[in-house]
Image (tube, helix red, strand yellow):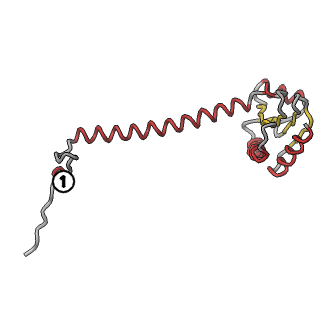
Amino acid sequence: MKKQRRKTSQKRNRKTAGGAPASPERRGALFTLRNGAVAAVGLSIGGVFMVRSVQATVSEHDLTRIGNGRASIVQIHDPQCPMCRALQRETRAAYRAVGSDDLQYLVADIRTAEGSALAARHGVGHVTLVLFDRSGEAREILPGHRERDELQTAFEAHLRRR
């Protein structure tokens, strides 16, 4: 004779802390509440990172900061140019490696009036870095793509000259 297994009802096995069966409506509400809380935390964290990213980008594009008492690295940049984006990655890495409060990194987007005016004033095109002293005088122009080690050396030398 075969043993028969008794199937237990899932509803009968699920009980709340007090021993009474949990209602499907309550379970659904708790599930929704939990998912909403997780989503809210995720969106909050993502929002903080987005705000900081936007603030950093706006700050980088503020060319009025040239000559504010800090030496400046200004990248003449076309956001649609792959060489410009590659130079930007290398420049940011070198800038972070230098880690000086006396140096600031700015971006002159040639697709804006301010960026194209700055490039024209110094006679340079995109994929170029212009190094300014504390008073806003251009001291060195680095055209073309450069590797981060070379840039880091140039930035450190620029800080020593100030």
Quarter of the figure with residue 82: top right
Position of residue 156 measured from the top left corner of the image (x, y, whole percent) = 86, 45
Inspect this view and state whether residue 1 appears. yes
Give the amino acid at mark 1: Asn
- Could you tell whether 31 is left or right of 153 in the image? left
At x 92%, y 35%, the residue is 139
Position of residue 34 measured from the top left corner of the image (x, y, whole percent) = 36, 41
- Could you tell whether 8 is left or right of 110 in the image? left
At x 28%, y 40%, the residue is 28
Quadrant, the N terminus? bottom left
Along the viewing direction, whichever of 108 and 80 lies nearer the viewer: 108
Quadrant, the C terminus? top right
Name above or below for residue 61 compared with residue 151. above
Tell me the SS state at disc 1. helix
Q: Residue furthest left?
A: 1
Along the viewing direction, whichever of 69 and 143 lies nearer the viewer: 69
Position of residue 159 measured from the top left corner of the image (x, y, whole percent) = 87, 40
Quarter of the figure with residue 113: top right
Task: State how many labels appear.
Answer: 1
Along the viewing direction, whichever of 18 and 38 lies nearer the viewer: 18
Q: Residue furthest bottom?
A: 1
Which residue is labeled 1 in the image? 13
Inspect this view and state whether residue 75 appears. no
At x 75%, y 43%, the residue is 92
Name above or below for residue 21 compared with residue 36. below
